[in-house]
Image (cartoon, helix red, strand yellow):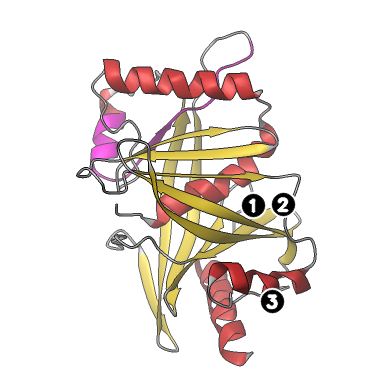
Amino acid sequence: MREEPFDRQIRETLIEEAQKVSLSRQRQEKIMAEISAVKQEKGRGNIMRFQSGKKIIIAAAAMCVFAAFGVMAAGKIVGMRTSVQNDKPNYTEFSQVAGAEGILGFKPDAVETYSNGLAFQKGFLADVQGYDDAGNVVQVKPELSLEYKKGGSRVTMSAMKPFEDNQNNRERAVRTEEYKGFTIYYYEDRYLFVSADYEPDENMKKEEAAGRLFISYGLPDHEDGTPADPQETIMYSVTWDNGGAEYLLLSSGDVPITGDSLIGMAKETIDAGLNR
């Protein structure tokens, strides 16, 4: 399965979005059932599109759940799922992060405080499960996620080894930059989060087909059962590879870190690895 930076963006963004939504386990299961029903009834073999396929997401206050569905041959990875408890981080002190090496299989490059003032807040270590079209887990990869904040700005850094059949397609990067032997890819992507049965209009479909919009199905309904209002956001990210691991820095929200500043954070992360 081809996993784009956007797939990981969704996983990391859910950690932040989970703080805004309160769902019981029953409501989570109901949403996933509704998504599955829509998928079958409307022939949406791939219900949610993020360049590498269609994805499905739900978010809960204490738990983030991510599921992905794509079109692949039997036995291949067609989906990914991971979860974290946002109120129960694995790391509350930056000095603890180095201990992730034994689980990740590589020493993660990380910065405690960036030159733009964003400082480490907490970190998570969770398994990302890759499963086939029969629902069998065929690969499991650990992923490290670190959260940085300064005022209203937030950036998430993640690092993991890719799945064995991963094929990154970085043609959509709006900017690339070479730095000390590493290629940094910069993205700006427009996402629309909607309910499971949301019907995009023709203009949205054209925008999606052109790769200018990514529609994410699975936003929880209101408590009274009425569909959730669509929520649009722009995600800014940079990615790069180092020693067989893939790194991602992601920012969104009211005060995002973008452009040169986000690329600068990538360079500082690379330097942290080169200088240790």
In 3D space, how far apart are the residues under numbered discs 3 and 2 (Cα atoms)? Answer: 16 Å
Task: Write the start and end of the magenta stretch as one range.
Answer: 204-223
In 3D space, how far apart are the residues under numbered discs 2 and 1 (Cα atoms)? Answer: 6 Å
Residue at 66 percent across and 30 percent down: it is 21
Instruction: Assign a secondary structure to mark 1.
Output: loop
In 3D space, how far apart are the residues under numbered discs 1 and 3 (Cα atoms)? Answer: 17 Å
Residue 210 to residue 263: above or below = above
Q: In which quarter of the image is residue 118?
A: bottom right
Q: x, y (%) of residue 75?
A: 25, 46
- Quick check: 263 left or right of 85? left
Instruction: Assign a secondary structure to mark 2.
Output: loop
Q: x, y (%) of residue 67?
A: 45, 38
Residue at 41 percent across and 57 percent down: it is 5
Amino acid type, mark 2: Gly
- Quick check: 104 left or right of 196? right
Amino acid type, mark 1: Val
Residue 226 to residue 94: above or below = above
Residue 208 is covered by the magenta coloring:
yes
Instruction: Assign a secondary structure to mark 3.
Output: loop
Q: x, y (%) of residue 9?
A: 48, 51
Residue 195 visible to an observer of this rendering: no
Residue 152, disc: 2
Residue 244 is covered by the magenta coloring:
no
Which residue has dot 3 on it? 115
Which residue has dot 1 on it? 255
Residue at 47 percent across and 27 percent down: it is 218
Viewer-proximal residue, 122 or 142? 142
